[in-house]
Structures are given as C-alpha cells and as structure tokens.
Amino acid sequence: MSTKVEIIIDNLESADVLEAALPDILTKARAVPGLRGLESSRVWPKEDGTPTPAHRTITLTFDGYDEASAGTATPEGGAFFGAVIQATGGKITGLFLDVETV
C-alpha cells in the first residue's frame, strides 16, 4: 500500500506569497528522496462566496510509510517543509495517509 503525505494549507490573509513561492516549493518537493508522485491542488471557490475550508493542498506519494517517514526526515524533506511553513506562516495541517484502494 502506498502512503501519502497531505499538506492542507489554510486560507491565508494573502495567498499571493504562497502562490509566488509555489514553483520553488514544488521543486523542493520533487527532490524528496523516495517520492513517487506529487500533486498540487487549489480549492475551488464556493459559488455563494463564503470562505472555503482551505486554500490549497500539496500531496506527496510514497511506496509506503517507511519511505514517507525516511524521505520527509531528510535535508530535502526539511527544505520542502521549511519552504511551505515560510510561505504560509505555518497555517497548515499535515497528514500521513495510508492509501486504501477500493
């Protein structure tokens, strides 16, 4: 089974800083050892104009939990997470997910 590391980025006062930093953040993510897949998704705005529950997600996919743990503990993983935290002010939730194929 694969493991995903899901970074949920909260709504930010100004998403411009994050969006400007996103290419560098994704470059850093691609350098994380053991990475098998990478997705970046922006939350669609609500039709009624009310706030969305989050602004964006970044998902890193690994072969398993051990690979995800090892990859994110490397200097490259630290550079990725550091860039995310710097661009968001730490307004994130990070999850390690055990992917269940149904």
Image (spheres, helix red, strand yellow):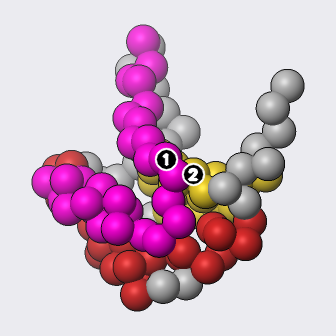
Residue 46 visible, this orientation:
yes
Q: What residue type is labelled 2?
A: Thr
Q: Quadrant of residue 100?
A: top right
Q: Give residue 2's position: percent from left, percent from top.
A: 72, 50
Residue 37, which numbered label? 1
Q: How many other residues sit within 10 Å of disc 2, few (<14), some (14-19) or many (≥20)?
A: many
**Residue in view at x 45 percent, y 64 percent:** 91
Label 1 amino acid? Gly
Secondary element at tag 2: strand
The quadrant of the picture occupied by the C terminus is top right
Judge by depth and name the residue closer to the eye, 71 or 95. 71
Task: Please tell me which residue is depicted at 41% across the width and 24% down the height of the picture.
Answer: 44
Would you say residue 54 sits in the magenta stretch?
A: no
Q: Are marks 2 and 1 in contact (CB under 8 Å)?
A: yes
In magenta, the rendered stretch is 20-47
Q: Is residue 61 left or right of residue 10?
A: right
Q: x, y (%) of residue 71? A: 54, 74
Q: Is residue 93 left or right of residue 80?
A: right
Residue 62 vs 65, above or below: the answer is above
Which residue is found at the position 43% from the left and 32% from the top?
43
| Near-viewer residue (72 or 87) | 72
What residue is pinned by disc 2? 61
The answer to if 36 sits in the magenta stretch is yes
Q: How many neighbours does mark 1 have within 10 angstroms: few (below 14), some (14-19), or many (20 or more)?
A: few
Q: Which type of secondary structure does the marked residue at label 1 adopt?
A: strand
Tell me what residue is drawn at x 42 percent, y 82 percent: 78
Look at the picture and state if 82 lies above or below 87: below
